[in-house]
Image (cartoon, helix red, strand yellow):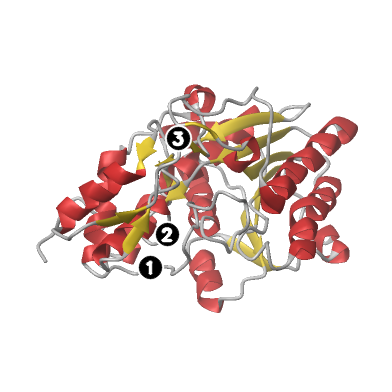
Amino acid sequence: MPSIDSTTPQSIAELEDNLSTPTPDVIDVLQRLDGDIVVLGAGGKMGPTLARMARRASDAAGSKRRVIGVSRFNSAGARQALEDSGVETIACDLLDQESVQRLPDAPLVICMTGLKFGSADNPALTWAMNCYLPALISQRYRTSRIAVFSSGNVYGLVAHDSGGSVESDATNPIGEYAITVLGRERMFEYFSQKLEIPVVSLRLNYATELRYGVLVDLATQVWQEQTIDVSMGYVNVIWQTEANAAALAALAHAATPANVMNIAGLETLAIREVCQQIARLMNKPLRLTGETSSDAFLSNATKSHELVGRPSVSAETMIRWTADWVARGGESLGKPTHFETTDGKY
């Protein structure tokens, strides 16, 4: 079919270049902060592009720092791609205390570790990854500045017209996954106070790119003419480039006691309207089911927009790019987000 949007990245290489391009805010922060960067969990969905952004921003800032990606690295190709981009890599079982202790020193740490999908089937591993591992990391990097990925799910459901949860709101996690994510935050918070570690927790709702994310889930279902459940009727999304940039820039705002920032887009999207727009772009019939709930997992990211940068990629652009990519048969990671889940069982 004809291209829906000619500005869509046209290849994996072009997409990954976009996702790893540093913003001026990131370059400025990494120019002001000294020392090497360790990215823990660098082999995940966001890790490779975040690590490459850290490398590119450091180079642009004139810094000779090392950027080191740590992961199990089940894919040799993904590990080699990082090495080729100037990111050093270390294969490590992060639940092994001795292996963690052998990791190199680094004044700056991005923690992207955690378990979500499959957590309902393996709750013990979920607790170990999300609550025990933070203790190991905190003690190993007790003299570092740490930015920790968390989730907006720790707030629980809020009214769709509320503007979303803000950082000062009480937490109300639903389900074991969200409870352990809050546990991750609490462990870093405890060690931040006990060991005086500057920490910032990043409550993310939801990063999306063209191979993975809420918009990919919806566009794929529309393209395949599947019936889409709109019971979970509202969502926040943020382009992954900007989520990566926010995480790196947030290192400058790590504090003791631990700071908290919501990372999300500017808009609250109505799932029904997003599906309608995608169907029009693809010239596909639309099949919807379910009664839309008035509540959803939503975050207000005004604080992070003011401190680490306001997103510039609009929801309209993300929707058009995603529809174009999916319709052209672009690569997918094949990992549904299950954003529509309301009982917290992933």
Count of numbered labels shown in the rendering: 3
Compare marks 1 and 2 and give the one earlier in the sequence.
2
Quadrant of residue 183 in the image? Answer: top right
Could you say which is closer to the camera, residue 9 or residue 234?
234
Q: Does 38 appear above or below 76?
A: above
Q: Image height check: is 188 above or below 41?
A: above
* Mark 1 vs 3, N-terminal side: 3
Which mark identifies residue 332? 1
**Helix or strand or loop: what does disc 2 sit on?**
loop
Q: Residue at x 45, y 46 (%)?
A: 232
> In terms of depth relative to the viewer, which is nearer, 293 or 180?
293
Residue 24 seen in the current view: yes
Q: Where is residue 334 in the image (x, y as percent from the top left)?
A: 44, 69
The residue to which callout 2 is attached is 212
Q: Could you classify mark 2 by the number of other residues whose Cα lies within 10 Å: few (under 14), some (14-19), or many (20 or more)? A: many
Q: In which quarter of the image is residue 260?
A: top right
Q: Name the residue under label 3.
A: 294
Question: Which picture quadrant has residue 257?
Answer: top right
